[in-house]
Image (cartoon, rainbow, N blue to C red):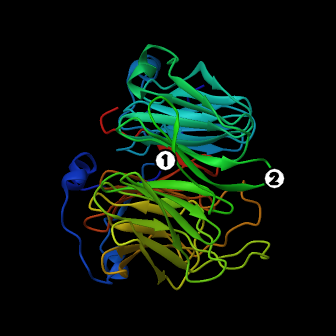
Amino acid sequence: MNTWPRTRLTAIPALLVAGLALAACATRQPETSAGAARAADTAGTIDTASPPAPDASARSTAPVTDPLVTTYDGGLYVIDGNSLRVAADIPLPGFNRVNPAGDDRHVLVSTSTGFRVLDAAAPALKDDEFPGAKPGHVVRHAGKTVLFSDGTGVVTVFDPKDLAGGLPGGETYTSAAPHHGVAIELANGELVTTLGTEEKRVGVQVLDRARKEVARSEKCPGVHGEAAAKGEAVVLGCEDGVLLYRNGTIRKISSPDPYGRIGNQAGSDASAIVLGDYKTDPDAELERPERVSLIDTESGSMRLVDLGTSYTFRSLGRGPNGEGLVLGTDGRLHVIDPERGKVVDRVEIMAEWREPLEWQQPRPALFVRGGTAYVTDPATRELHAVDIASRRKLGTATLPKAPNELSGVSGIGG
């Protein structure tokens, strides 16, 4: 069922609207700390509480432009990435997660039974589903999308371009034991995948095109998450650092603390440095870290950056030029120069917030596509769009219900 909610949009100057589609070409990276001044310079608010609704035929046939997808308690909103208007409200019970499928129109929805295909450009939730108990990580790299089913240990590799013709057959590989894992296929066909069981995760192995092991390391307790950097350097998080796979060799990069857990990372093809989270208290019910890690895949080193505020697992992103982006609980988007290891700007977006104890509960989320950062605020039900190069807020919309996860298509031009 499609709904067209009462929407409040911030006025978007014409040049900035064009920037939404072209921001991936932006090269300017201001190094000021004038986030508050820029926020005051944001375009004024226009009251469009009762916008004219398109006719029924337009709703069912007009494709959604650069779609975004948010989950809420009981369903999904498909949102036009330029106007920020809700194009479809799709009921779907249960706790659902969303990830880009790897093309310019599909999103994968993790349900209780597998990875279900959402045609976000249509918009329509298909019956097509990659089955798998406890569907986990979705990784896109080198033109392939890789799924990991935690309940079965099955890794599925497919070409996302094939989604338009139905459910792709793809290739599957079954891990030695089910576990909460992740995998990535490289351009040369190698598969980097985690090792572990339901009780213990220990490291990674690398398989060649014939799926024979060519490298292995079990020096990664609690292995979790992955990111690829410039030159296809792959980083996987551990409770005491990371494992780096580069040029056929696995290398351990240790944290400066005995327990320095890195479990969520964000990589960029434009940078050899991976942005990661960083936690140091193994006994905390919920640690609220204020430092992030920067892993240099060329030098094999790690350094920490103090943000002065906490953040969550939905807070990390990368800009088009490799900028590190972290959404803080102070309500600001922190921009990091990874080469200098320094916060170079802070952009005011929302009020301060506090991470809930239960990880499934809504909290602000960051999704970056091209030169635009999209941020949700469940407390106000708002969705914000920010131009990364200029640090200006492009627009704000109020959603009918509080958003939880935020994602979208990975290609521009849905």
Residue at image position (42%, 49%) is 48
- Residue 16 occupies quadrant: bottom left
Look at mark 2 in the image and give the residue it sits on: 199
- Please report the residue visible at 76 percent of the width from the left and 47 percent of the height from the top: 197
Q: Amino acid at mark 2?
A: Glu
The residue where tag 1 is placed is: 7
Does the image show residue 48? yes
Does residue 63 appear left or right of residue 354 in this picture?
Answer: left
Residue drawn at 40 percent across, 51 percent down: 248
Which SS class for mark 2?
Answer: loop
In the image, is 39 to the left or to the right of 149?
left
How far from the left and from the top, in percent, is residue 258? Answer: 65, 81
The vertical placement of 114 against 29, above or below, is above
Q: Residue 53's x, y, as percent?
A: 45, 31
Q: Is residue 50 visible?
A: no
Query: Mark 1 or 2, which is nearer the eye?
Result: 2
Give the distance between the C-alpha atoms of the residues marked 1 and 2, in whole angstroms. 47 Å
